[in-house]
Amino acid sequence: FLVTPAVSFQKQPVTYSLLINPSSLFSIQPETGEISLTRTIDYESDQHRYLLLVRASENQDSLSSAAE
């Protein structure tokens, strides 16, 4: 897993959202950015690699950044 913390230089709260979420398999905690599964994965029949696009946004100024 790649972990990249979002830093607000404006000292504003940062919220997280998923922009790309294949089969709605993942969920994200908006306040922490913690990603978890919404169901169990069958490692024999499901794919083994997933692409997620996560957005970190500053609430007040509508600033955002996305990471793949």
Image: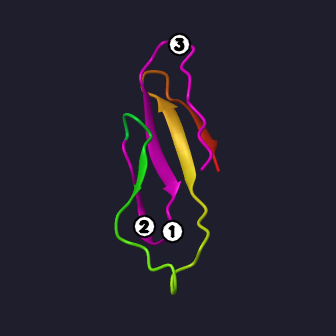
Find the distance from the CA under tag 3 to the CA under tag 2: 33 Å
Q: Which residue is mark 1?
A: 22
Residue at position x 56%, y 33% from top?
64
- Give the magenta-colored segment's residue range: 1-29
Residue 45 placement, left or right of 68? left
Residue type for callout 3: Gln
Residue at the image point whose x is 50% and y is 79% from the top: 43
Mark nearest the camera among 3 and 2 is: 2
Q: Residue at x 48, y 12 (%)?
A: 11
> Which residue is identified by label 3?
10
Instruction: Where is residue 8? Give x, y as percent.
Output: 54, 19
- What residue type is disc 2 on? Leu
What's the residue type where badge 1 is placed? Pro
Residue at figure coordinates x 65%, y 51% from the top left: 68
Helix, strand or loop status at disc 1: helix
Q: Which residue is denoted by mark 2 in the rendering?
A: 25
In depth, the one of 43 and 21 nearer the eye is 43
